[in-house]
Image (cartoon, rainbow, N blue to C red):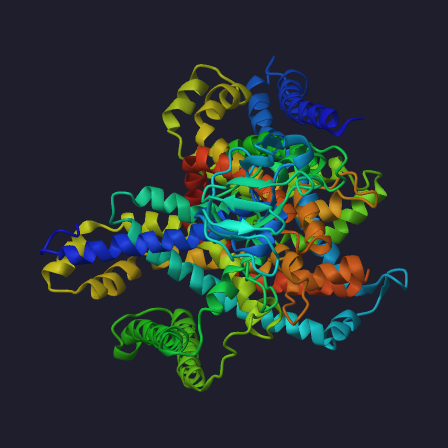
Amino acid sequence: MDNIAGRKSALVWVVHISVALLILLWLFPTVGLFVSSFRTADQIATSGWWASLGEVEQNLVLRAADPDEFRVERNGRYYVEGNLFQEGVEAEISAWGTSSRAISKYQPGDVADLKKGETITVDASGNYTWSGPENRMKGRGQRVFVTARTPPDFTFANYDKMLFDETNIEGMTKAFFNTLTVTIPATIIPIVIAAFAAYALAWMNFPGRAVLIAIIVGLLVVPLQLALIPLLKLHLSIGIGKGYLGVWLAHTGFGLPLAIYLLRNYMASLPRDIIENARVDGATDFQIFVKIILPLSFPALASFAIFQFLWTWNDLLVAKVFLIDATGETTVMTNRIVELLGTRGGNWEILATAAFVSIVIPLVVFFLMQRYLVRGLLAGSVK
Amino acid sequence: MHPALQGVITIMFGIGGCLGYFYLANLVLDKFIFPPRLDDRGKNINRANLVRPWLFLAPAVFALGLYLAYPVFETLRLSITDRSLEGAFVGIQNYRQMASEAKFWEAMRNNMLWLIVVPATSTAFGLLAAQLTDRIAWGNIAKSLIFMPMAISFVGASVIFKLIYDVRPASNEQIGVLNAVWLQFEGGIGSFLFLTLLPAILLLGFATIVVYTVWIVLQPIVTGRKNTGWLAKAVQVALSGFGLYLAVLALLNVWRIFGAELEYGKPQTWLTLPFWNSFFLMVVLIWIQTGFAMVILSAALRGIPEETIEAAIVDGANPFQVFFRIKVPQIMGTIVVVWTTITLTVLKVFDIVFAMTNGQWQTQVLANYMFDKLFRANDWGVGSASAIIIMLLVTPILVWNVVNARKEMK
């Protein structure tokens, strides 16, 4: 439609560039967290994450190999040769030195005089030749200060520590499984309850139906903040207390209005013929519901399931009020992260890893089921 | 018992229990209570069909009543009683105490700011993104990337943005992007362009758009072309007045921008800057909600009949006129829906403030104030009173939704 009346192509480029900029702006924060979770504490503290994507110039202190073990004798002189960097590291040295007061005294290939007949030379890729008389070539390896450009260097150590290290009391594994334990029943149970109610509201005639639908639309926006104290009191008084059962019930209750609303709208749009034919053929309401409506409503069920999954997985408030007791055994990931923000405010390698562990599952679900999420959003926003 | 096992059992009990309940209840109704036998077969079938809907609805109605409707009234009751006096009736004492607290008014002020800034910015960005991405081939990929923050928890987003706002001493390298960018500015011509001229132009642009919108809204009323109800007129006039107020505010601030003295070369602790820190928290929510606005508005934009746009272009409308006078009026209903939905999210925003500042440095909002009162001060009276305030703020939207839904049903 934009081509009619001869539009200019210059504007198209502006659009492309603006969208690209918008995307960069929107992705930048998440990418920062993602990249940071693969860096060591030292790297994070000394440079911004954006610097780690290209080559970084670093000042490093390295050491030649142990002379007592590796020295070889040639013509009365002792030599130690090798590479300053660990195997697999490719770096380019731009300057080096042998004293902390003059760390860039020499160029690659220069020979440094270490007095009393001892010399060392280092080339750009880190190969060194260190030599001297026997009495000098012992003890620890010679220290070398280098200014080197190192390629991007990332590590899985943070994930190892936060997920697989059983001695780490700050680990996320337990919280991860707790979150999963909260999420799955809290997603499935409201669907079943809501589906039956939605069927009744869509396809059964009874007095008070319109009022009930209006009430559900109203409940859709009631802030769950109002429910915290009354329900906690209720749970404590009937013996559920704080725990999984309580949080499942709470999530079920809070999710129901949206579930009923979405499912009812979808079911009401199904063709009337199918249902009436089934009725004529003698099917009961229960059979119609289970055999016809439920399979046909799959897209709406999926939409709601994604909503409820994202909402329960990402929730902090409901878990804090109904689930997490004084022992902290049942903590969920969001709560864990808030605790870490308090105790480890500056340790970004821990925070970034913990946060990324908690957002990776929702992101995967999001990208796989985006179609249903969008459909649910379009149907769920009250028109 | 292991929680995972407990979870599996609960799922089985929950689903099995529900299905079993529905099946057995139907069976009992048909076979035993109203069996279609003998003389009153027809009567019994009718009777059974009268009861059946309520069988289907019973669990949902029970859960809704217990978990959403009852708490509203119980919270109302708690807000006018005192827990320490064993639940004695104290009238509006809790509300009075709340009104005497500076922190409450701070929360109210901030909430109002959130209520204006977040829905407006998210909707505007969403509209912009929808309009732009609808015109290009790779628009769907672009959309899904802008939409992605929807999947990220408020807590996760808080960590993401805390890293952006991070501050290190001036002698160290900055690892937060915002400070790294800030230190690039040294007060030269670049600083003037980006930190003075650009904000001033943005504010002027904002004021222009607001005035233009107000003009479009008021034009039919002033010229008396459209006959709408007096209530609609009153709302339109009130909103226009508010819009003009915002525009004037924006213009006044343009002067302040030119007079402002900035601390170049000093890393800033963004989250403790008075007044502005609230905006840094709002950015997190805007970042999340823009995708939502974009998805809904993009669907609405696609639903606009092409003939209207073609007709406008043939009549010589420029792109801006097409957008503001043809497209926007046609999707006004959707814009209102997006706006109100984001407003609801804003009213309930808790996690972001809780995780990033916990209401310190004058960033308190109502939901966090309430949590503070309920679970840290253990003051159920004042906590419930503030929950009722949130409910009151939600009520207009609630009524509006119900009225619209009823209209649609007819």
Return the x and y of residue A122 as percentages of the image width and height.
50, 44
- For residue B63, which quarter of the picture? top right
Residue A2 versus residue B212: which sits nearer the camera?
A2
Left or right, A58 with respect to A137, comes to left
Residue found 66% across the figure and 36% down from its top? A67
Quadrant (top left/top right/bottom left/bottom right) for the N terminus of chain B: top right
Residue lying at the far top in this picture: please name it.
Answer: B38
Give the residue at the far right of this rendering.
Answer: B85
Q: Which residue: 55% across, 35% down? A: A81
Q: Position of residue A47 (x, y in %)?
A: 54, 55
Residue B326 location (% of width, % of height): 23, 61
Judging depth in this view, the residue of B288 and B187 nearest the camera is: B187
Q: Nearer the viewer, residue A133 or A51?
A: A133
Q: Is residue B225 visible?
A: yes
Q: Is residue B183 above or below residue B189?
A: above
Query: Residue B310: where, in percent of width, then height?
Result: 14, 55
Q: Is residue B124 above or below residue A121?
A: below
Question: In the image, is residue A355 above or below residue A181?
Answer: below
